Amino acid sequence: MRIPLALRRLWKVCPKQRIRYALDTIQCSRGDDGKATIVVTDGKLLIVADLLEGVPPADARPGFSANVPASLWRLAFKLTKSDGTGIIIGETDPCSIGIGNENIAALPVKNQKKFPDWRNIIAMTKDKPVAETQGEGLLLAPSVLATLTEVLTDIGVSSVRLKVLAGKDSPIAFSAKGGDGFRIFGCVMPLSGD
C-alpha cells in the first residue's frame, strides 16, 4: 500500500505512550470494497484519510490491514526524498516498510494490539442532529486543536467543514478534501465540562 508524502505528519496525533489500545500506531487498511484508509487517533482526536481511487495507487489487496508504530512511520518518512513518493507498506507478515525498492523495517501483523473501532465513532457523528446553540459553548483542549490544524495544514487542506453535534459531550465532526486526492474526516472529542 502506497502512503503519500502529504500524510507524513499523521504520527503527531499519536500519544507517546501506549494505553489500552494501539493508539501509538497508524492503521493502514484496504477494505473489501477496495477503499484504502489511513486512521490515527489519540482518543481525543480522530483523523481518517480515505485515499481516492488511483491517487495514490491503492495497490494493497482487499482486506489488508497493518498498524504501523508512529516512531517507524516518522522514521520512514524522514528517509524519503521530497519527490512526493511517500512510503510503501508491504502485505507480508511481518509487514515490510519500504522506500522505493529498499526495505527499512519489518513489522509483525498478526497478534497486534487492538486498534479502536473508529467506524462506530464516525457512525455516531453521522446520525446526530446539529446543535442549535450550546449555551456556554464547548470546552476543547487547545493542544488537540493545534495538532489538528498542524496536520491538516501539512496535508494541504485549505478549508474544513465543522459540524457541532447536539448532546452533552458530543464530538465536533469535521471533513475536508486533501490536496493530493484524498478525503479527510474525523472528530474532536470535547473535554467534559464540570
Image (spheres, grey):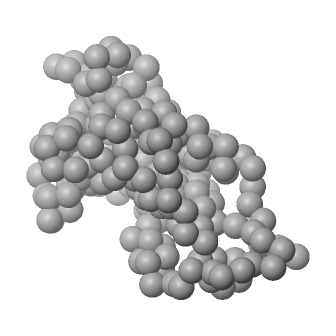
Image position of 28 (left or right of 128) = left
Q: Where is residue 191, by image quadrant?
A: bottom right
Q: Is residue 105 above or below residue 169?
A: above
Image position of 4 (left or right of 188) = left
Query: In front here: 17 or 179?
Result: 179
Report the residue at 37% width, 44% height from top.
178
Q: Is residue 15 visible?
A: yes
Q: Is residue 94 above or below residue 87?
A: below
The location of residue 120, given as percent across then percent down, is 43, 76
Report the residue at 43% width, 36% height from top.
156
The location of residue 106, given as percent across then percent down, is 30, 33
Disc tally is 0
Report the residue at 30% width, 27% height from top.
86
Q: Where is residue 80, by image quadrant?
A: top left
Report the residue at 44% width, 67% height from top.
118
Quadrant of the frame with the C terminus: bottom right
Image position of 191 (left or right of 90) = right
The location of residue 62, given as percent across then percent down, is 13, 58
